[in-house]
Image (cartoon, grey):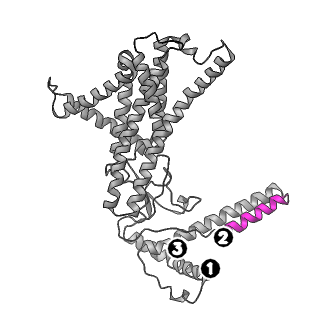
Amino acid sequence: PKPIIEIKGEKLAELGPLPILNTYVASITVVIVIIVVAYLGTRRLQLVPSGLQNAIEGVAEALYNLCIQTAGEKNGRRFFPVAATLFVFIWIANWMALTPIFNSFGAVQEVSVHHWHDEAHVITDKGGVGFIFPFSLLGGKSPAVEFEVDETEVEHIASEITDLKAEGASADVIEEREKIKEDALEHARQNAFAAALPKAAGMDLDFSACEELAGEEHEQCRTEIKLAHSEEARAKLEADGKKLGVIFPYFRSMNTDLNSPLSFAIISVMFIEFWGITGLGLFKYGSKFLNFSSPIGFFVGLLETVAEAARIISFTFRLFGNMLAGEILLLVMTFLMPFLVALPFYGLETFVGMIQAFVFFMLTVAFGALACEEHGGHDSDDDHGREGGHAAAAAAH
């Protein structure tokens, strides 16, 4: 079996017009876990903390101190609730994605000829190619089935269509040939599916008649034998209660879905702008972006505007790229090597999961401190915090 990577989340169900994706289910699970941990850690508060309360207070105090050191006392207290919430949510989500319940079990979609992708990968009606594709046969020990579609005839018809377009053929003629091409592709996929059934049913076919042939003739002979036994294989599968299908997981890391990092980025940037406006005032803050005092000031304002918008892209793809790459790495290593060999990569992703949450936290605080900085002077009591904001932003980048 080969792992098939699908970037978008798979749809498990629908709630009215809203699709319920497995990444959304994972995010709700993360919220529930955080609520439960917070409740268990704070239900019996003690003046001298211990156990879970001590761990929670330790994390909160460390994050709070970082906010104060980076943005100053006044701004640090304002930034802490939002930045710390983003950190905890992203951190717990990244670590939960490493648990065995993620990408290991899920809904099953029965496979038919109508579930083919252009590259001949089996897909589902609901959500695209399964993130893990090891289950070609359910309920048995037969090997996974790989499908190969012979598109020779399809390619020949496509070449004819290209020639007809070059010759200036009418739209009706081209449309007719396109329909013939679609029918040929459908027929090729049906044959590929039927030829895969004997292997799925665990049948040992006799290919001795093909031994004296070579090249395409040899492959054609084997395909014909498989097709001759496809109905027998189909009946055997039905009698055994087995089905050909794919599986897509109930739980998948929410940060491997672009929507999640994007939502975090939008929230972070919105609060950064809010902090800047409430800290400096609307007009003073807006003068960073709309400065008509000089041509250079106007150009700098345009650069500031682009930089603010670019933060959304930076926040989003830093988190999304690292988490998706890590998930693919773990998936591929698990398929290629024994379990113990893949363990160091889980350790690596444990580190990366926390680091990415920390980077998101620090950038939110640092950019917030920069947004509250006045141009042309340092009149506030938080100059030290501003300097920390500059340093933190530079270090995070």
Relative to 376, is 104 on the left or the right? left
Label 3: which residue? 195
Check disc 3: other Cα within 10 Å, few if <14, some if 14-19, many if 20+: many
- Residue at the image position 42 percent from the left and 73 percent from the top: 201
Q: Circles 2 and 1: CB distance less than 8 Å?
A: no
Q: Is residue 372 left or right of residue 293?
A: left
Q: Is residue 391 visible?
A: yes
127 above or below 240? above
Amino acid carrying label 2: it is Thr
User: Tag 2's secondary structure?
Assistant: helix
* Camera-nearest residue between 189 and 23: 23
User: Which residue shows up at 58% across the image and 68% down it?
Assistant: 149
Percent across and percent down for residue 255 are 43, 41
The answer to whether one can see residue 17 in this image is no
Q: Which residue is mark 1?
A: 216
Q: Nearer the viewer, mark 2 or mark 3?
A: 2
Q: Nearer the viewer, residue 259 or 209?
A: 259
Label 2 crowding class (10 Å Cα cut-off): few <14, some 14-19, many 20+? few
The residue under label 2 is 152
- Helix or strand or loop: what does disc 1 sit on? helix
Camera-nearest residue between 170 and 257: 257
